Amino acid sequence: MSIENAVVGVRDLRKAYGAFRAVDGVSFDIAHGETFALLGPNGAGKSTTIEILEGYRLRTSGEVSVLGEDPAAGRLEWKARLGIVLQSAGESGTATVREQLTQFARYYPDPRDVDELIAAVGLEQKAGTQIRRLSGGQQRRVDVALGIIGRPELLFLDEPTTGFDPEARRAFWQLIRDLQSEGTTILLTTHYLEEAATLADRVGVIAQGRMLDMGPVDDIGGADARIPIVRWRDSGGVHEARTAEPAIEVARLVERNGGTEPDGVEIVRPGLEEIYLDLVATARADAAREAEAGAHPPGDTTAPGGNRDTRDPRAAASAVPTPAASEEARR
């Protein structure tokens, strides 16, 4: 897919702070109506990447297109086409839930019905309560409601269900499915890998500022990563064997054990969580070896194209709107 045809198009994106490379050559596309989950550990470069896409942070180099525009120069009309649910928006003033949503609804040409939205995020009983008096999980639901009230074409969901109990999380998933059925394009970050597997059409795994793998959930890691593992325990400790025929392997173990099943025998069929953890662990080990070998000499922050960014992260952030500093950024 060309960068011009994608709802989100990223090519060789880089962000450096002095010698530290927060994002180091990331590329991906998101198609219209697709839900793309960007996964990675804390400090992987997810938030930096998303803030660049939202127009909150400037990139060091690379190409970025979001809804056909460079987010670094996004106009107010462009921002109105986005929905943003940050990790913590901090809407905790004296306004009630209904008052806050009613105010934000006025910013958009075709907002959702406020009462229907309150019901969708499970706050019917709290509609007349001041936001500051809500629990943390309830305030998070207000954040989500504010992000989708304007019927965005592209919705950024950054850890949207943090603080939700299991029942509320399942209800939120249904809300996302409803948005998907309307054709909303969604970029999701989450530490709940079941959430990514349930909601995403594709996932990308990022660590150490680099994209490790990308594709449909069932393809991440490749076929070899999904070969079952037989695990058992004996006097010598815990053992495991990876095999495409786990039942046959267990039968062999029983035979070698005199017809008795070994202690703790289990068959593990790797899912997204196991594959994700393996990818991240491998990336960390590779980064440690590169650092030891001096693959990135200290002070070398020049990215392809000759751009150099030595600004402090706080200075870079102040160059573009932030949720706390600009109400326009919420539109």
Image (cartoon, grey):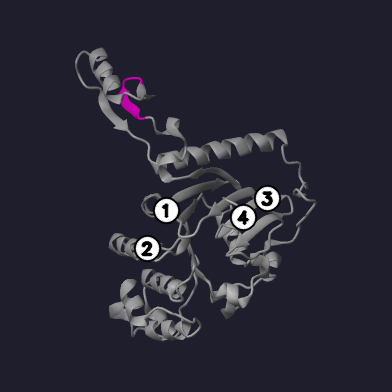
Q: Of label 1 and label 4, which has the lower sequence position? A: 4
Residue under label 3: 21
Q: Of label 3 and label 2, which has the lower sequence position? A: 3
Figure check: 330 above or below 55: below
Q: Of label 1 and label 3, which has the lower sequence position? A: 3
Tag 1 and tag 3, C-beta contact below 8 Å: no
The kind of residue tagged 1 is Ala
Figure check: 326 above or below 6: below
Q: Of label 4 and label 3, which has the lower sequence position? A: 4
The residue sitting at 24% across, 19% down in the picture is 251
Quarter placement of the C terminus: bottom right
Q: Which mark is residue 62?
A: none
Instruction: For residue 275, say whether it is visible.
Output: yes
- Most foreground residue, 206 or 311: 206
Residue under label 1: 200
The kind of residue tagged 3 is Arg
Question: Label 4 crowding class (10 Å Cα cut-off): few <14, some 14-19, many 20+?
Answer: some
Query: Main SS of the magenta segment?
Result: strand
* Residue 229 inside the magenta-drawn segment: yes
Residue under label 2: 181
The kind of residue tagged 4 is Ile
Q: CA distance from mark 1 to mark 3?
A: 28 Å
Tag 4 and tag 3, C-beta contact below 8 Å: no
User: Residue 87: x percent and y percent?
Assistant: 49, 65
Residue under label 4: 3
SS at mark 1?
loop
